[in-house]
Structures are given as C-alpha cells and as structure tokens.
Image: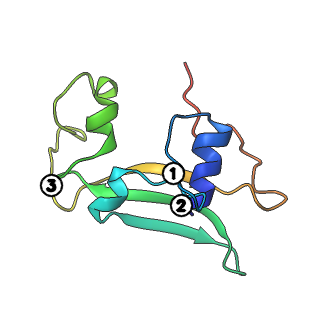
Amino acid sequence: MFRDRADQFKIRLNWEVNVDAHGFERDEYNDLNPLYVIWENADGTHVGSMRFLPTVGRVMVNDHFSHLLGGRPNFQFNDLGMHPILFVSGRKSKSCSSADACRWRDYGRVRR
C-alpha cells in the first residue's frame, strides 16, 4: 500500500511527498492511528486503499486544504461539526501493478 502511494503521489502526480529508503510514502497522518480500507486481489496484492481519520483530530483537509471549505477553521461536513464517529477520507491510492489496474490513470488529479 505505501509503495503504491509513493508511485501515485510522487511519480504519477509529481507531488512533493517524502518517500523512505523502502519506497514507502508516509506522512504525519499515518502516525495518528488511522483506519485503512484496503482492496486486495485474490493473491493478496494491493489494488487500492483509503485512509480515514476521525474529524475530532488533525485531518489533511483542515491542515492543507481549508480553502476548499471556504476557509472554515474546522472540518464541517454538512454543518454536522466534528464528532468521534464522523471520519474524513484522505490519501486514496490505486495500484498500477496489474495489467488493467490503471484504466483510470487520472484518479487523484485536481481538475480546474
């Protein structure tokens, strides 16, 4: 999963992210005990993944993308506010290691 994240964010999207000596892309949000949803092939290879964090703590959308929320200081989803069972998704990644895996190569690109 972390190698596919490195491939997606560093190589394909050319984002400024850190990749360690093992080829893993990890950031400070990985240290906050996130919930990961991971899709695997029958042979156990990574297909895709998503990372979820509760809105009561630090989340990427507040720290880096608050302009997308109209500059609000805290994550507010439909004005429900922050709640320990309300999660926000970030760092979705898709593997391109199988023959048909990258049919949607534009995944993750920001459109203007």
Do the residues under discs 1 and 2 have CB atoms within 8 angstroms?
A: yes
Q: Residue at x 55, y 60 (%)?
A: 2
**In the image, 28: left or right of 8?**
left
Crowdedness near tag 3: few (<14), some (14–19) or many (≥20) residues, C-alpha within 10 Å:
few
Label 3 or label 2, whichever lies nearer to me, is 2
Q: Which residue is mark 2?
A: 49
Do the residues under discs 3 and 2 have CB atoms within 8 angstroms?
A: no
Which callout, 1 or 3, points at the residue further toward the start of the chain?
3
Total numbered circles: 3
* Res. 22 image quadrant: bottom right
Label 1 or label 3, whichever lies nearer to me, is 1
Relative to residue 42, is residue 55 depicted above or below? above
Q: Amino acid at mark 2?
A: Ser
Q: Residue 36, labelled with which disc?
A: none
- For the residues labelled 3 and 2, the Cα–Cα distance comes to 23 Å
Relative to residue 11, is residue 33 depicted above or below? below
Q: Position of residue 112 (x, y in %)?
A: 54, 18
Q: Position of residue 12 (x, y in %)?
A: 67, 39
Q: Amino acid at mark 3?
A: His
Q: Secondary structure at mark 2?
A: strand
Crowdedness near tag 1: few (<14), some (14–19) or many (≥20) residues, C-alpha within 10 Å:
some
Which callout, 3 or 2, points at the residue further toward the start of the chain?
2
Q: Which residue is mark 3?
A: 83
- For the residues labelled 1 and 2, the Cα–Cα distance comes to 6 Å
Q: Which residue is mark 1?
A: 92
Do the residues under discs 1 and 3 have CB atoms within 8 angstroms?
A: no
Q: Residue at x 64, y 68 (%)?
A: 46
Which callout, 1 or 2, points at the residue further toward the start of the chain?
2
